[in-house]
Structures are given as C-alpha cells and as structure tokens.
Amino acid sequence: MKVAIVTGAGSGIGRASAKALAEAGFTVVLAGRRADALNAVAAEIGSNATAIPTNVMDPKSVANLFVKTKEKFGRLDLLFNNAGSGAPGTINLEDLTFEQWQNVVATNLTGPFLCTQEAFRIMKAQTPRGGRIINNGSISAHVPRPNSAPYTSTKHAITGLTKSTSLDGRKYDIACGQVDIGNAASGMASNMGAGMPQANGTIAPEPTMDVGDVARSVVFMASLPLDSNVQFMTVMATKMPFIGRG
C-alpha cells in the first residue's frame, strides 16, 4: 500500500490529482479547509480515501494531519503540496493590505514548508525509508501576471523550497519535484475564457487545458521509483501566452 497526502484536495487540481492517484493505486488522504468539499471527494473516490480537514497555515493543524495519517496507515509515500491562494488581481501592488500579503504567504509558502517538515519526520524514519514530495509551482514561478506580487513571490519561493527539499532529502531517500501548471481549467482559472489582464494593459481571453492533464502529470511523477525524479515539469495549455511572455 502506498499512501499519499494531497493538500487543497477539495476542488480543482487537488481533487483531480487525488482521484487520479487513487485510480493509480494510492491510498489518498485528502486535506483542505472545507470538510464538506473533502467529504464529497472522498465519496467519489471510495474506501481508499480519507478526509482530514486541515488549515495549512496553522502548525498544529498540519501536525494533526500527519499524526492521523501515520496512526491510520503507518507510513507516507507521497506529499502533494497543492493548496494555494492569491490576492485579488484587481488591486494594485501599492494598495494591497498587509493581511492580504500575509494570507498568501502563509498559504502558499509557509504551508508547504510546514507540510514538508512533517513529511520528512515520517519518511526518514519509516521502513522502507524515504518518499516523494511534489510541489505545485505554477507558471508564476517563472513569470508574473499583472497585479500578482504576493502569488508570484510565493511561487518563485516554492522553487527555492523545492531545490532545498531535494538537496536536504537526499540523505533520507526523499525525492522532491515541482510541477508548474499553466491555465488548467479549475476554479482559479474560471475567468480565463472571459479575458485576463495582459502585460500591455489589454484584456484578452486565454486558452485553458483539462485539469485531468495535470493530474496525469502528477501521477507520472509520483509513480517513478525513488532513484528517479522529475525535478521540474511544466504542463500548460499549448496556446496560452507564456512562451514569448516578458
């Protein structure tokens, strides 16, 4: 039995990835703030899914997630750090509140760090030793959208966390990779067809891709033996305005 924790599993990329991992043979622990959404996903997956409501911004809540996972299953093979949020894209950088900045940093950067710490503690001590961590980086780990300073800053920082996790995990047989996603048709991308702000000040619709394509990419990364690793993968809508951006 292989056990996976997916954060932000109640919707979008997390939901699709959790379902795909379950279909690939993983027992999946669904983490997120909304118990009703998690329970709905667990019902879709069936008996090899467990919902544990979790706030990744809260160290005690994160610790509880991993303690309960270990108590129930005895090990952890995969952590998908997927939970994320952004500040409203209609607000100029200079008008963002401290609370808006802090909320995005806590969710997108501190949360994955806390989860990674807890995963290390389980993975390095279990038999067989080791495991895999996948971080959701986003296209914004490479280039920003207008008015996205908190989100873009944290996603650039996730790349640093991914590299540090890869290096510091080697001695424990813990592999870490990052999937950078562009315009998956999930809740966060619901407005893309209607038009997104572009760097030149215009509003233009952007192509999207099926969220299932992201889930299949996550399953591929997760299915590799621990002596192989996808360090960085970019999966994106083919015609989205990324190549040539900037």
Image (cartoon, rainbow, N blue to C red):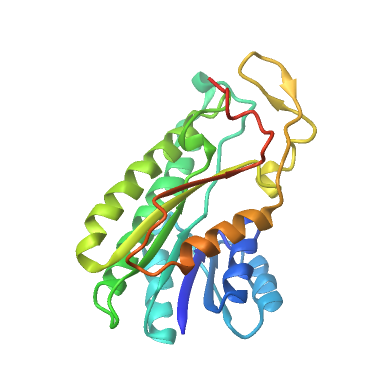
Task: Measuring from the top left, give residue 56's x and y in whole percent.
Answer: 45, 58
Q: Residue at x 30, y 61 (%)?
A: 117
Q: Is 167 located above or below residue 49 in the figure?
A: above
Who's the residue at 28% across and 80% down the image? Answer: 126
Where, by quadrant of the figure, is residue 92 drawn? top right
Q: Residue 218 in the image: state x and y as whole percent.
A: 53, 59
Q: Residue furthest right?
A: 194
Nearest the viewer among 60 and 206 is 206
Relative height, residue 116 to residue 153 (above, below): below
Q: Is residue 191 left or right of residue 22?
A: right
Left or right: 214, with 172 as reference point: right
Which corner quadrant of the image does residue 47 belong to? bottom right
Q: Nearer the viewer, residue 187 or 227?
A: 227
**Residue 139 can be seen in this image:** yes
Query: Where residue 145 appears, x then y in whole percent?
Result: 57, 27
Q: Given the current orientation, which residue lies at the most extreme left position? A: 171
**Is residue 14 at all visible to an observer of this figure?**
no
Front residue (pair 203, 224):
224
Residue 78: percent from left, percent from top? 43, 69
Picture layout, residue 147 above or below residue 22 = above
Total numbered badges shown on the rendered structure: 0
> Of residues 160 and 177, which is closer to you in this image?
177
